[in-house]
Each structure stands twice: as structure tokens, then as C-alpha cells.
Amino acid sequence: MKNFKALPFVLLLGTALGTNLTISRFSMGQFSSSALAAYRFVIAGFVFLLIFLISPKFDFPKDIKFWLRAGFWGIIGSAIPMSCFLAALTYQSSGVTSLLLTLIPVVTMILTYQQIGDEKITKAKIAGAGIAFIGAGLILLKGENGIAGLVRPDWRGYALTGVGILMSSWSAVFARRYLKHDNTLQATGIRMITAAVVLMPFVFLQEGGIHLENVRLSGFLALLYLSIVGTLLAFMLDLLIIQRFGATYSAQNNYVAPVVSTCLGALLLDEQITLTIVIGMVIIFVGLHLMNLSE
């Protein structure tokens, strides 16, 4: 990373998203994946509404075109990928999921070059991207899931993660192209509100309503953390990095998130760290580092 001004922001974002995945998997025992995704956006969106309504420093966005841009960003960058990543945690550990998410910078770089043209593709970046894919491919071929007791890997976990990666990368490029000069707080607020509106109907369709009777105090505390830190603050920081430094810099939080989620998952959730996972992580990081050296 040659732009070291972005480093503190990237480290904070990676830490928030790394703890995000581990706490999400912990919460899966008390919430369904669809409910967990919807509830956290409802809480985050409600906080944004309060900020807009109470604070005189922030105006409630009224531009219809802005709502359409930021709302679409909320669907492709929040509602869809979040649902995919949480559902994937049913079939694989938070560490494996986070490790596979390191492919986001690679996909983001490719999409940025194709759709915007401000990402120079060099031989070193192509080599780095190929190495990163090899690291992820090693994990897939070995069928690693990181969950003790779950012997057979389930293709659904990999497929859901893949869809989430594509949507996350596309959303970063979309934000860089269409939201670069917009207000960070307003755009993130619309993103959260739109995601909540899109996801809540699925909770009623799948579960017949809101059911919290089996949720313990730990579940409510986890949901609050995921809503405020893992969603609201993380997504504001994400857009801030995209606006100031570019989509590729935002995606580089994936250096940090796998280390955080893998270590926390092993400590708190008894997730497995196998030799294959470690080797795959090293290979992916080598690829990502090679991509950054060529900037």
C-alpha cells in the first residue's frame, strides 16, 4: 500500500469486518441468517433516521435521484452480499468465509478497470491476482470448512460466498463511479434503510413474523454490536475510503479481516485452523501484496 494515509482506515475497517463475521456466526444459533441480516439493517437504518431527524447538522436527503443511486447501492452492496455471507456461515467457519473474501480486491480491481478505467492493469497485478486465486482454489479443492464435526464440505457455502464477492466488488465500483462526491452519511443512511426495507419482507415470508422469544441477552448484545459497529460504522468507513482513496483501497481491508476472524473463531467458537487454511492464507496474501507493489 503506497498511500499510507489510507492504512489506519483500512486497518479499522478490516478489524470491524473480521469481528463482524465471527460474531455473526455466534449469533446464528439464536437468529436465522435472513433475520440476522434484516434486523441489523433495521437498527442501523433507525439510528440514521434519528441522526437525520434530531441533529441540525445533517439534512435528510430529499433528492430522488440520490435516493435511487444510494438505494441501488444498498441492494447490491448490502442486502444481497450480507444475506449470502451470513447464509454461508451455516456451511463453513467465519475464518474460511473471511479468507475467501480476500478475493474481493482481485475482483474489484478487474471490475474497476473494465467499468471505470482508473485501475491500471499490469503484469504484476495479473500475476498477483492469479496467485490469490490459487490460494483460494487450494482451500476449495481441499474442501476446507473450518468447522469441527462437519466433515464434508458443502458447495452451497462456497457458492453463496462467491455471489457475495461478486456483488460486493460491483458495489464498490458503483460507489466509486456514482457516489464519489455525495455526502458520506446520507449515502450510507440510504444504503442501510434500503437494505432493511428489502430484507424485512423475507423474514415474514420465511418465519411468519418477528420471533425473539428464544434470543438470549448475548444474542441481543451481539445484534447491537453487529448493527452499530459491524454495519453502521463499518459501511460509513467503507464509503469514506472509497471516496478518498478508491475502490481498490477499500477492498484491501481483506488483508486484516481474515486474520481477525480466524483467530477469534478459533478462540471463541472452536473453529479449526488447518495447515491448508494457513497455506491458502499465505498464498493469497502474497498475491495481494504483489498486486499492491505494482501500483
Image: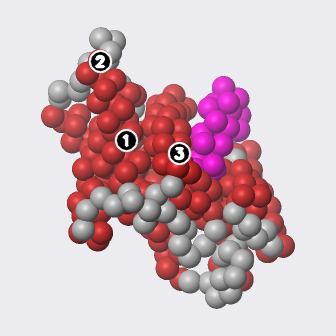
Mark 3 neighbour class, 10 Å CA radius: few under 14, some 14 to 19, many 20 or more = few
Residue drawn at (18%, 36%), measured in percent from left and top?
65
**Where 163 sits versus 73, above or below?**
below
| Stretch of the chain drawn in magenta | 1-21
How many numbered marks have been drawn onto this rendered protein structure?
3
The Cα–Cα distance between marks 1 and 3, rounded to whole angstroms, is: 12 Å
> What's the distance in space between the residues labelled 3 and 2, CA to CA?
25 Å
Secondary element type, mark 2? helix
Q: Main secondary structure of the magenta part?
A: helix
Under mark 1, the amino acid is Ile
* Of the pair 229 and 185, the residue shown nearer to us: 229
Q: Which residue is mark 2?
A: 54
Q: Answer yes or no: is residue 177 visible.
A: no
Q: Residues within 10 Å of mark 1 (few under 14, many from 20)?
A: many
Q: Could you tell me if the residues under marks 1 and 2 are in contact, i.e. CB atoms within 8 Å? A: no
Q: Residue at x 74, y 45 (%)?
A: 293
Identified by mark 3, the residue type is Leu
In the foreground, 190 or 69: 190
Mark 1 = which residue?
Answer: 43
Give the label, 1 or 3, closer to the camera: 3
Sequence-earlier tag: 1 or 2: 1
Q: Earlier in the sequence, mark 1 or mark 3?
A: 1
Q: Foreground residue, 163 or 291?
A: 163
In the picture, which quadrant includes the C terminus?
Answer: top right
Q: Amino acid at mark 2?
A: Ile
Is the residue 278 above or below the residue 54 in the image? Answer: below
**Mark closer to the observer (3, 2):** 3
Give me the disc on residue 221.
3
Q: Position of residue 57 (x, y in %)?
A: 33, 12
Q: CA distance from mark 1 to mark 2?
A: 16 Å
The reply to whether discs 3 and 2 touch (Cβ–Cβ < 8 Å) is no
- Residue 205: % across, % down: 23, 69
